[in-house]
Image (spheres, rainbow, N blue to C red):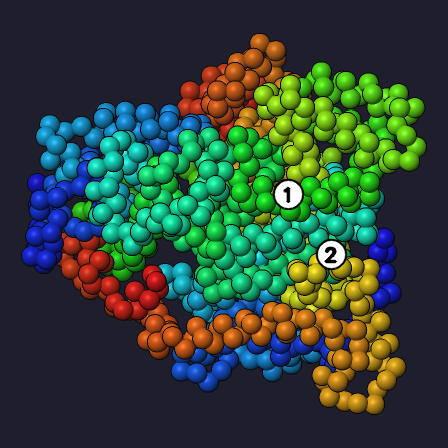
Amino acid sequence: MIPQQESDFNLNHLKLYYGKLFPFADLCRWVSYGNDANHPGCDQSYMGRREFSFTLVDDIYLRFQSFNNVHELENSVKEKSPVKIDIGPVYSVDPAKRYAYAQSENNVFTPVERELIFDIDMTDYDDVRYCCSGADVCLVCWPLMTIAIKVIDTALRDDFGFKHVLWVYSGRRGVHCWVCDGKARRLSNEQRGAIADYFRVYKGNENSHKKVSLTGAALHPFLATSYTNVLKDYFEKNLLTGQNLLATEERYEKILSMIPDESIASELRGRWQDGRRSSSAKEDINVVRWEQLKQLLQSGKHKAQGLRRCVEEIVFCFTYPRLDMEVSKHMNHLLKAPFCVHPKTGRVCVPIDPSRCDEFDPTTVPTLSQLIEELNYESSRSDVDGELNRTSLGNAITLFRSSFLQPLLKACKSCLEVTSIDTIKRWNVHSTVELSRSILTLIFSYNCNRSSGERKELA
Amino acid sequence: MEIFRPQSRRNILSSSSDAVSVPTIPLYRSAPSLDVRLEEFESFAIDRLRVLKGISDGMSRGKKPEEMENLVKDLWKVNMRQQHASEVLHKDIISHFALRLVYCRTEDLRKWFLSMESALFRYRFRLLKNAEAQRAVMEEFDLPYRAVSNVEFESIKEKLGQVARSTGQPLPTADAIFYKVPFEEVPELVAGRKVLISQGYAYVAMNQIVSLVATLFRSQLSKTLILTNRKWTSSIREQEKHRLTPIVEAMCSSYLGPDYSQSREYADISLKDIDQVAKSSFPLCMRHLFDKLKEDHHLKHGGRMQLGLFLKGVGLNLDDALAFWRAEFSKKVGLEKFEKQYAYGIRHNYGKEGKRTDYSPYSCTKIISSTPGTGDHHGCPYRHFSEENLRAALGRMGVNSRAMEDVIDKARNRHYQLACTLTFEALHGMPCDAGINHPNQYFSDSRKILQSKA
């Protein structure tokens, strides 16, 4: 278990962290998407239209902060020492000046770009983990997050064709995902919702029984691939025994209640209630019982009744990723910036390499106090990269750069080069509207007579 | 009788739209050069509104696509009937553009109109039945997509078959046509996992093309609504102040019902009364959230929104709302965390933070169409509860066993609002002829009855 170490978080340490270690430049290069260069296709206002939001130590919440460049961001963070930095969408206008624009009748203050984001939180798995609950995580339940990363990451790349996907440890009990391809950033809320729903298999809520329902004669290829490549193995080789899913009556009853055929459920119950003598001592009781369940449900005589799907439903219920849907569906949701320090655990929100996510261990993620100690231990050299490399944050930043930032900026650069300047021109708010007497003409004329500025806004 | 003559456009548009190939469903892209009588402007619009309202009711009952198809067919026949086919088309187009003006004016109106018009379009497209007519509409859209080649089809045949089996469709035959479309163009097929998605493309079968076309229709309409709104506010409203503006402004409110964003008659429900009025006058969806909040001292986002905005509509002022939520949440998360994490959201609902929009309480339609997930208690109990839980909840409310069967029966048949209406009638011993369309309407109707009894 990761204890909640309040002592690991200390405002003076945080100041030092922002002063010496926090990778402002990398963060800004990322959220500028190449617009910070001198290329004529760059949109110089891009970074300045991004919302940042700070949570200060006295529970003061500063929303709609905006910064034109890395220096402004760095100065403000160093001055205010926020315990949390959130990143919001890119708006149509500078969010700090939103009131000025709100005066005009057309509400032009609206999000125009936002990474497609996912937030997966261990608390949503409380009904399928027995090791800890709520805000705690341990190495027994962490595989649930590993599964989530594998399933979602694979589908984002193979199905949706995205390339620039950043996974970040949330600092305590979950993971965040940022999909940064240009196409992803420009998705509408409806399209975001569609992707989130594509990933959704939980149809139940707190007031209805069935949590996972897989109907149809086959699984959709995405679910089938996830099942055979990830879920099944993690369930059988890891969670089944790790969580002791069938070890006690209370636990196996939970699984039996998911079998729609009462006669099968009671047959298994009968075997398991006095099952002690029949199972050999060597084999794990969970494994033995799971094999019995599978055998009974998947045997020939039940296949026709559609019970075969039931084994898959159980596996999905205990392994399949549970997304916080609202976060993904709306452009204006905020998400904590990578490399923040979690105020409760003191752990840094480090990137996770999805191709090696099995190796990620949340209990060894660098903490604020550990980093400060490392800084103090050897304080002879002074350049920032040197400082970083001496601390355990170095690896995290190297990973961020090599596996995410560099390929991303390369793609942004080639994209900007093909974008001509005129399409970058900002939409002119005060475009004149032609006056005309006939009502029908007025309604219909937009097709032909809209200004070039308006066309840009529609694109 | 006034006649409008769209002079300036006539030359440009008449040649193309009046001409030979009039599609069976107009896409309302360009102006017809038609003269419109003022009375037609209004009566056509009202007839179309009846169609849209019927669609809205059907959707809030969770009708299946096939049922919706029949509903739309009937609604259209009843309301849009004219003597000659050309007059039907004429009425179709005029009524659409008239309502576009009526419903361009606020975001809520636009949203409603957009989803109803899109649904209307979708079912009319489905009703075309023959492939020729559908293809004619598709051609009108000028879709840039090509059918998947034989070679590519062979390489993904197995997966396409898997998708077909997962959705209960027949397996694709060798001559089946699939379109390869960027997945963003078919959000509803993506959301339902009804298509194969690979490397950013969705493989859309011929019988799914309606989704693609409907999505395009919707996005075009969405854009033009915003532009129409801009014109409305910048010039039309003022120019037509004596002629069309009064018609336009009167029309939407009479059909959509009040939005309950400003509580009127029963303002000033105070904190001390809230437990008692919750028992007597909250609809089940709110009662359930209220009870869960008292029990768990916590609600997830969807629940906070649904209950919070309802309470605002009931007349709880911001200070009382903060006190109310604080009293519960602080028991679980502590005062500090409440002020930090949750108070903002409450002030936001009252238009005191962020975009500063004064949000409206959720209507039944919105609540019924929500999708509560793990840990969620919001949504419409008649739709989202299992039957067992619904029975228990109704029992706690005090619905007697005879009425209970009627309610359950309605819920089973997906008449959620009727189920709620029956519950209302059972608890108040009075008929509720208007039916329940809004939780705040349930509340105010309930208060009216209880106060007249007292």
Question: Mark 2 — on which chain does it sit?
Answer: A
Kind of residue indicated by mark 2: Asp
Q: Is residue B245 left or right of residue A104?
A: left
Q: What's the residue at 76%, 80% (across, down)?
A: A389
Kind of residue indicated by mark 1: Thr
Q: Is residue B21 left or right of residue A315?
A: left
For residue B115, what is the image quadrant?
top left
Mark closest to the chain's N terminus, 2 or 1:
1
Q: What's the residue at 86%, 21% (across, down)?
A: A273
Name the residue beneath numbered marker 2: A358
The image shows residue A366 at horizontal and vertical percentages of: 80, 68
Front-most of residues B125 and B75: B125
Question: Few, some or many C-alpha atoms within 10 Å of disc 2 (few <14, some 14-19, many ≥20)?
Answer: some
Residue B108 visible somewhere in the drawing? no
Q: Which mark is residue B170?
A: none
The image shows residue A344 at horizontal and vertical percentages of: 79, 60
Front-most of residues A386 and B152: B152
